[in-house]
Amino acid sequence: MKIFTFTFTFKFKPGILRTTMIILSGGTGTPKLIDGLRNLLPDEEITVIVNTGEDIWSSEVFITPDIDTVLYLFAGILDKTRWWSIIGDTYNTYHQMKELGLSEILMLGDRDRAVNLARTDMLKKGMTLTEATADISKSFGIRAAIIPMSDDVITSMIETPRGQMHFQEFWVTHKGTPDILSFEYRGIGEARLSPAAKVALEKEDCVIIGPSNPMTSIGPILALPEIKEILKTKKVIAVSPIIGNEAVSGPAGKLMAAKGLDVSSKSVAALYKDFIDVFVYDIRDGVLNPEDIEKMGIKAVALDTMMTDEERRTELAREILKLFNLLSV
Ligand code: GDP
């Protein structure tokens, strides 16, 4: 484990010491935590490195769902009942496209589609995904840094008895019902960490691995070259998306089982053990024995991780900042 010495200057929010927090994120669990963090840290001191393994082309539009969720969160327009899409968006184009017989894989709202069309146009003009994301962030007046994990195309593909399919086809079209034989991050062999993500990671000390799917959200980020080595030099706190033997939501459990893993927080900690310092698991987890985590050389901390409302999201974020020794009170 690493020894950390921080030299911080006081920031304007009372009681909080200054640093930029890096968060590795997917599109549901971690954005909830970021929502809480935003009540404690100024946005410009938050950098989010976002999974792109669920990106997909649909009806000529390049959709990067996890980045969009994080963008809309910081823009203050995210639908926080679903944790995707823009609040109050309309679906006229989606329904018209369906009527025209197009296979709309994702249910894209009209405003959401406008953002994705703008992004697609930028990419077609030769911008990288990092540049396009920065451009869209600027248009929304976002002060946090939102960085795709990579500018290369990485696609989570699921092997099922019905054949191989994109993760979105598995999860959205088939509602996660097919058995999973295996899955892969197609393109990972040739992919690089986004240069902007690398710079941000090298510059900062504190990293949160949020409670995102360890297989399809955090897994692709960690599969990129260099990142694990960089994380070994940081203070890293991970939050479990699993309580007992079940994911709080989504297909994480099914995907973990397909990899031959027990669906448990212990398995999640084992995946991250080489580079995390603290593992946060839920106070309701009756299965986890914290000693198993401590044996991996990781500090185990039980917290209320069920982020069902803003107060709970903020409380969890506050406890995590305390663990980083970032709160002076
Ligand atoms: P995706 O990109 O939409 O798949 O979303 P993520 O990977 O970011 O988040 C999905 C994971 O978040 C699931 O594995 C859930 O178990 C986890 N999750 C969602 N809400 C919560 C919560 O309130 N607390 C915890 N601990 N995990 C959560």
Image (cartoon, grey):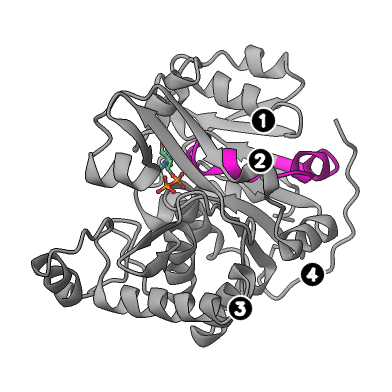
Q: Is residue 320 visible?
A: yes
**Residue identifier under label 1:** 272
Quarter of the image where one finds residue 16: bottom right
Task: Say few, some or many: other residues with alpha carbon within 10 Å of mark 2 (under 14 / 14 to 19 / 20 or more).
Answer: many
Q: Is residue 287 above or below residue 52?
A: above
The residue positioned 49% from the left and 62% from the top of the image is: 67
Crowding near pointer 1: few (<14 within 10 Å), some, many (20+)? many
Which segment is the magenta one?
212-236
The relative height of residue 235 versus residue 96 in the rendered view (above or below) is above
Residue 74, x across and y down, in percent: 49, 71
Q: Nearer the viewer, residue 30 or 229?
A: 229
Left or right? Give the position of 275 relative to 3. left
Give SS at disc 1: helix
Marks 2 and 4, the one that precedes in the sequence: 4
Which comes before the other along the chain, label 1 or label 3?
3
Q: Nearer the viewer, mark 4 or mark 1?
A: 1
- For the question of whether residue 17 can be seen, the reply is no
Question: In this rendering, which labeled residue sits more in front, label 3 or label 4?
Answer: 3
User: Tag 4: residue type?
Assistant: Phe
Mark identifier at residue 222 = 2
Comparing labels 3 and 2, the label whose residue is closer to the camera: 3
Disc 3 marks which residue? 126
In the image, residue 309 sits, relative to residue 41, either above or below, namely above
Image marks 1 and 2: residues in contact by CB distance under 8 Å: yes
Q: Amino acid at mark 3?
A: Gly
Residue 129, percent across and down? Answer: 59, 69
Decide whether residue 229 is among the magenta residues. yes
Q: Nearer the viewer, residue 65 or 278?
A: 65
**Residue at the disc numbered 4:** 10
Callout 2: SS: helix
